[in-house]
Amino acid sequence: MEFITAYNLTGVLLGLCTFLIIGIFHPLVIKSEYYFGTRCWWVFLIFGVVGVAAALVVREIFWSSLLSVFAFSSFWGILELFHQRERVRKGWFPKRQK
């Protein structure tokens, strides 16, 4: 962290990590809906609540910010699960054969 703060790279690293977290959640939502449907929305809710709680406890701003990005990406995942169900219904994504 000393190198990062010495060269004022905290914002850039935070932006990169935010990009990666959102990039990971996109396929995670698609795969979750494919294998479990919308039944797994509560898992995203639990991750979101735990992430917010952890962000409130962690004192260092960088890690607290990353936990917040993770938490609110989890909350966003709930909404996207239901949107993904509609995309599958419209035929834009494949439906799992049971």
Image (cartoon, helix red, strand yellow):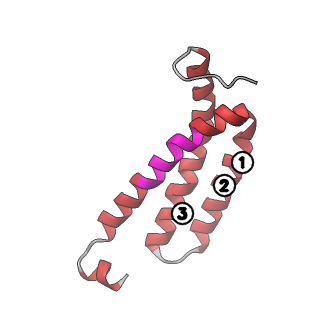
Q: Which residue is mark 3?
A: 67
25, 94: nearer the viewer: 94
Point out the image quarter for the C terminus. Answer: top right
Residue 92 lies, with reference to residue 69, above or below; the image says: above
Residue 94: give x, y in percent of width and height: 58, 23
Residue 41: give x, y in percent of width and height: 70, 40
Residue 36 lies, with reference to residue 71, above or below; the image says: above
Residue 78 lies, with reference to residue 3, above or below; the image says: above
In the drawing, what numbered circle is on residue 87?
A: none
Main SS type for the magenta part?
Answer: helix
Sequence-earlier tag: 1 or 3: 1
Which residues are drawn in magenta? Answer: 20-29
Magenta stretch holds residue 44 = no
Q: Disc 2, disc 1: CB below 8 Å?
A: yes
Residue 46: give x, y in percent of width and height: 71, 53
Q: Disc 1, disc 3: CB below 8 Å?
A: no
The span from disc 2 to disc 1 (Cα, nearest Å) is 6 Å
6, 60: nearer the viewer: 6
In the drawing, what numbered circle is on residue 43?
A: 1
Element under label 3?
helix
Q: Which residue is mark 2?
A: 47
**Quadrant in the picture for residue 11:** bottom left
Of badges 1 and 3, the one in the foreground is: 1
Q: Amino acid at mark 1?
A: Val
Q: Amino acid at mark 2?
A: Phe
Q: Amino acid at mark 3?
A: Leu
The span from disc 2 to disc 3 (Cα, nearest Å) is 10 Å
